[in-house]
């Protein structure tokens, strides 16, 4: 029953989380323009999905999860394995978003990290558990609205503070403009290839959930075409925030540059709006992954086992309990972690080779069977 505009907004809100804002700004601040160059992979992958993947999705009508799709391509055991991998991946992403929430709370609200994780994590967990995908979709729309207000404000303020766009590039040291000669070129090349050729973040559990909520492949294509048009503007503003922060505050190390800008450059009322916007950005990703993780654990992992053992259980109650347990576990991981980027890399390294590549191969019409899937699966596990 969801229209294209609703699906586009909830898809983009899910994609633009703590890593896309706090994480990327931190990387641009530290390493320069090369992160933005790698991020060109995002709109390229959107176009690939719009033109080559979307037209082939009609045969997955009736599927609810990424596990359902993989099961239809590679068999029931593959569905179960995908459910486990998808649950672990989504749990890591949820933990990374709770960690990002704790950064915002400790820096801007002066809360201790433990209380910050508990406060932010509890809010996401409870409305995701008891409101389900409807509450997630509705809040995502509101959160995306706050996102498109907050990011331009931050980019405009920091750019004006540093003398405009020309002023930023005139003041930047040459090392911040390096791409091919950058010491971390190989590392960011991997980022680019992952975002372009193996778009794990565009075919992950919550995004597949949005795709399967669409009425047709044509609607999915419209979703990704719109994303390809909007994402470059978002990435450009993130770039100016990161570069501008380096010009204005080159020596900060103890706090994320985005949070430092909000704390020091914004007037009181706008500071409150930006803080709320950051909460919205992070929660829009956290709630989507939390919802999809609970559903995959229930629908793809537990239900097949219960059917095999002839055990009846209430899926709706179980998914609520699973979401509550996941929220608690993710909060613990967030409390023990220190880097959003590392959590993102761990999760992408897990999902990309194990499910995204076989998924794209199957959708594109390559020969699919259980033997092919598990040969690739165990080879990847050994390498991982």
Image (cartoon, rainbow, N blue to C red):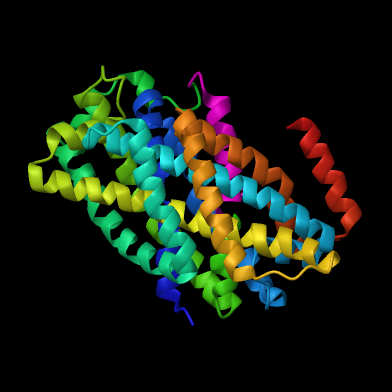
- Figure check: 275 above or below 58: above
Percent coordinates x, y for residue 248 in the rendering: 19, 26
| 163 displayed left or right of 376 | left
- Figure check: 250 above or below 266: above
| 340 displayed left or right of 318 | left
**What span is colored magenta in the figure?**
182-202
- Figure check: 2 above or below 379: below
Residue 328 is a magenta residue: no
What residue sits 52% from the left and 31% below the top? 342
Residue 187 is a magenta residue: yes
Front position in the image: 380 or 44: 380
Q: Toward which corner of the image does residue 28 lie, by quadrant?
A: top left
Percent coordinates x, y for residue 231 in the rendering: 40, 54
Percent coordinates x, y for residue 328 in the rendering: 50, 45
| 153 displayed left or right of 304 | left
What residue sits 23% from the left and 31% below the top? 260
What residue sits 53% from the left and 67% below the top? 210
Front position in the image: 183 or 124: 124
- Figure check: 204 above or below 88: below
Q: Quadrant of the C terminus?
A: top right
Front position in the image: 86 or 190: 86
Percent coordinates x, y for residue 378 in the rendering: 83, 40
In this rendering, the count of numbered labels is 0
What residue sits 55% from the left and 50% below the top? 325
Front position in the image: 333 or 48: 333
Residue 250 appears in the figure: yes
């Amino acid at each position: 029953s969801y229209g294209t505009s609703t699906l586009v907004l909830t898809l983009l809100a899910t994609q633009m989380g703590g890593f896309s804002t706090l994480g990327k700004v931190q990387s641009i601040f530290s390493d320069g323009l090369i992160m933005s160059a790698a991020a060109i992979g995002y709109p390229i992958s959107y176009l690939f999905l719009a033109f080559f993947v979307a037209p082939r999705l009609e045969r997955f009508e009736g599927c609810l999860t990424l596990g359902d799709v993989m099961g239809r391509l590679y068999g029931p055991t593959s569905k179960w394995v995908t459910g486990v991998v998808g649950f672990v991946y989504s749990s890591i992403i949820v933990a990374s978003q709770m960690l990002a929430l704790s950064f915002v709370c400790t820096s801007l609200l002066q809360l201790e990290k433990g209380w910050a994780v508990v406060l932010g994590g509890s809010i996401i967990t409870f409305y995701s558990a008891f409101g389900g995908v409807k509450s997630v979709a509705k809040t995502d729309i509101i959160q995306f609205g706050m996102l498109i207000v907050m990011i331009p404000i931050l980019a405009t303020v920091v750019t004006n503070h540093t003398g405009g766009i020309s002023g930023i590039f005139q003041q930047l040291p040459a090392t911040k403009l390096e791409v091919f000669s950058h010491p971390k070129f190989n590392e960011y090349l991997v980022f680019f290839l992952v975002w372009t050729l193996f778009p794990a973040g565009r075919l992950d559990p919550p995004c597949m959930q949005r795709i399967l909520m669409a009425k047709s492949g044509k609607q999915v294509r419209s979703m990704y075409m719109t994303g390809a048009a909007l994402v470059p503007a978002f990435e450009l503003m993130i770039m100016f925030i990161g570069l501008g922060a380096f010009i204005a505050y080159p020596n900060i190390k103890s706090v994320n540059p985005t949070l430092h800008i909000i704390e020091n450059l914004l007037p009181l009322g706008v500071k409150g709006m930006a803080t709320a916007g950051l909460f919205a950005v992070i929660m829009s990703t956290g709630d989507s992954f939390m919802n999809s993780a609970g559903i995959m654990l229930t629908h793809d992992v537990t239900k097949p086992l219960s059917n095999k053992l002839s055990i009846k259980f209430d899926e709706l109650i179980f998914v609520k309990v699973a979401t509550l347990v996941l929220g608690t576990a993710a909060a613990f991981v967030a409390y023990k972690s220190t880097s959003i980027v590392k959590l993102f890399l761990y999760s992408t390294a897990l999902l990309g080779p194990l499910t995204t590549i076989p998924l794209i191969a199957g959708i594109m019409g390559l020969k699919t069977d259980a033997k092919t899937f598990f040969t690739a699966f165990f080879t990847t596990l050994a390498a991982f």
